[in-house]
Amino acid sequence: MCEKLLEFSYEMCSEFDREITRHNFRLMCVPRDCGRQQVVELHVCASPYSWLSGGRDGFGNLCVYGAADDRHSSFSVRVTGRVKTGLCDREAQETAPAEVFLYQTPMTAPGALCEGYFERIRRNAERDGDDALRRALYFADCLHRDFVYRSGTTDTRTTSEQALEKGCGVCQDFAHLLITLCRMDRIPARYAAGMMVGEGQTHAWTEIFVGGQWHAFDPTHNCFAGDGYIKLSHGRDCRDCLVNRGIYFNPARETQTVRSEVRALYL
């Protein structure tokens, strides 16, 4: 992995079928400095808003808090900037111990299907003995072989067990399934959300804690998440990494669109 300078843009727009008011929101779509990346330029714009402030959640992810008090029927946020990636020698400041990511959540908890699948593939993984990273990569290789990428078949509420039953899903499902298998093997694993070169949408992958450090692996593409990736957040599962959370007055139906772009620049 070599150092790269990535230029990115992230846009999210929410349209409501009626006017809302007293809209309080928390956005998590801002990259932070961590062990593999350094933010060198950043611009955040939200519309409409009455006030904005910054902070961090319990995992150290950067959050934008704010409110839009006046009536509005649409809400948008745009984040642009540049991030230097491929920085292997920088220490990441962790706010949660790795042991936190050993425990399954409602999104990753195995049922009969995941337990049966794990038992079938664990026999071959055990040949790697104490090499936990190699076992985790073997789990990812099995998923790449047995699980099919297909959009429109799952949603943000789909659990690992439900995705395995369907036999197909998107990057969120690949990440959740690898997390489920790693945790069943007592390997700490967490969900990572972000962007990557060549994708027009946000992306998700898995981070595996072995040998005292986190290893970022993308089970959707069956490869390490290298210098073409920008991480926005990490957590126990996708619910910890939701980009937009909020409450507002006047119940309304919301339609959300997201677009992102990442391109490599010369250093």
Image (spheres, rainbow, N blue to C red):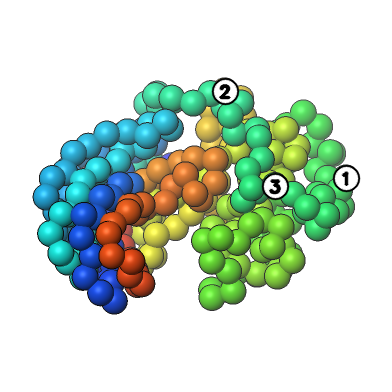
Distance between mark 1 and mark 3 Cα atoms: 21 Å
Q: Earlier in the sequence, mark 3 or mark 2?
A: 3
Distance between mark 1 and mark 2 Cα atoms: 25 Å
* Residue contact between numbered discs 1 and 2, judged by CB atoms under 8 Å: no
Q: Decide if residue 251 is in sight here.
A: yes
Which of label 3 and label 2 is nearer to you? 3
Q: Earlier in the sequence, mark 1 or mark 2?
A: 1
Give the amino acid type for the residue marked by disc 3 in the picture: Ala
Q: Residues within 10 Å of mark 1 (few under 14, many from 20)?
A: few
Q: Is residue 74 shown left or right of residue 223?
A: left
Q: Quarter-wise, where is residue 254 in the image?
A: bottom left
Residue annotated with mark 2: 212
Give the amino acid type for the residue marked by disc 2 in the picture: Gly
Residue annotated with mark 3: 109
Which of label 1 and label 3 is nearer to you? 3
Query: What residue sits 49% from the left and 49% below the top?
Result: 239
Query: What residue sits 11% from the left and 50% below the top?
Result: 50
Q: Residue 120: x percent and y percent?
A: 87, 52
As helix, strand or loop, the secondary structure at mark 2 comes to loop
As helix, strand or loop, the secondary structure at mark 3 comes to loop
Query: What residue sits 37% from the left and 34% below the top?
Result: 57
Which mark identifies residue 123?
A: 1
Q: Is residue 252 shown left or right of residue 65?
A: right
Give the amino acid type for the residue marked by disc 1 in the picture: Arg
* Residue contact between numbered discs 1 and 3, judged by CB atoms under 8 Å: no
Q: Residue 129: x percent and y percent?
A: 81, 32
Q: Is residue 150 shown left or right of residue 90?
A: right
Q: Earlier in the sequence, mark 1 or mark 3?
A: 3
Query: What residue sits 82% from the left and 50% below the top?
Result: 115
Distance between mark 3 and mark 2 Cα atoms: 25 Å
- Quadrant containing the N terminus is top left
Q: As displayed, is residue 265 above or below residue 183? A: below
